[in-house]
Image (spheres, rainbow, N blue to C red):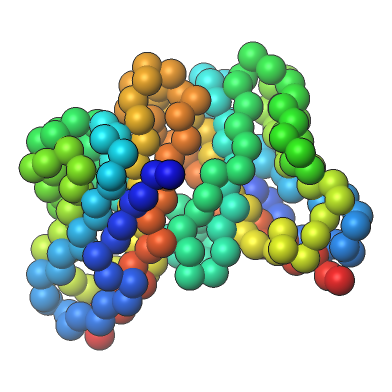
Amino acid sequence: DQQVKQNSPSLSVQEGRISILNCDYTNSMFDYFLWYKKYPAEGPTFLISISSIKDKNEDGRFTVFLNKSAKHLSLHIVPSQPGDSAVYFCAASVNSNTGKLIFGQGTTLQVKP
Amino acid sequence: DVKVTQSSRYLVKRTGEKVFLECVQDMDHENMFWYRQDPGLGLRLIYFSYDVKMKEKGDIPEGYSVSREKKERFSLILESASTNQTSMYLCASSKHTGGSDQPQHFGDGTRLSIL
């Protein structure tokens, strides 16, 4: 049972435009959500997170929105840059004592110059 | 900066071999994790450890075991390698703060091929 789903395997946007990456979850007990970015041949790097008690968190060009009633979160990148081309994973925190996360399948973002 | 180091970037082994993947972190993190990444499946948790000598099964532990004898080192063991264990293996660590706001930090991965 996939508790965290990223239904779009890929996304292509033009440089300078907005990129919106989506993530759905099923477990209402998740207390934190995180986004990671992964380049080929590198490990994922942490991008931004949001607590379940908030609905928005912003860090520079990156904003994460959380809609608890819809069990949906999204990552907005504005403006998109070619260097943002990577695989993006959303993740949800299961257990605050162990730090265990459940990851989605990932979305490959391509930003065209 | 947190440094998570995986011993090999690329590894080729034969079916039936016992394979060891090593991971070391330098930030005194309590939690350590092993994942495998496969196309279309994302990151799947194999095992994790929240303290020395403690281990918990993740979502896909079959065919694997782990060892955590020291806080900074977490080893993944393939008891008898099979071709379906060909994958990218990622190690991660995080600090235990009692909350969930400490992200996991990842190594660069080991690309393992079983022939």
Q: Position of residue A32 (x, y in %)?
A: 55, 26
Looking at this rendering, what residue extends furthest in the front direction?
Answer: B1
In the drawing, does residue A6 fall left or right of residue B2?
Answer: right
The quadrant in which residue A107 appears is bottom right
In the drawing, does residue B110 fall left or right of residue A12?
Answer: left
On screen, residue B80 above or below B56: below
User: Which residue lies at the image location 28% right of the left edge and 47% below the top edge?
Assistant: B25
Count the marks: how many?
A: 0
Q: Position of residue B24 (x, y in %)?
A: 24, 51
Q: Position of residue A39 (x, y in %)?
A: 57, 64
Q: Position of residue B15 (x, y in %)?
A: 17, 80
Q: Which residue is at the front of the view, A98 or A25?
A: A98
Quadrant for the C terminus of chain B, please.
bottom left
Q: Which residue is at the front of the view, B5 or B85?
A: B5
The quadrant in which residue B82 appears is bottom left
Q: Which residue is at the front of the view, B67 or A72?
A: B67
- Residue B57: in sight, yes or no? no
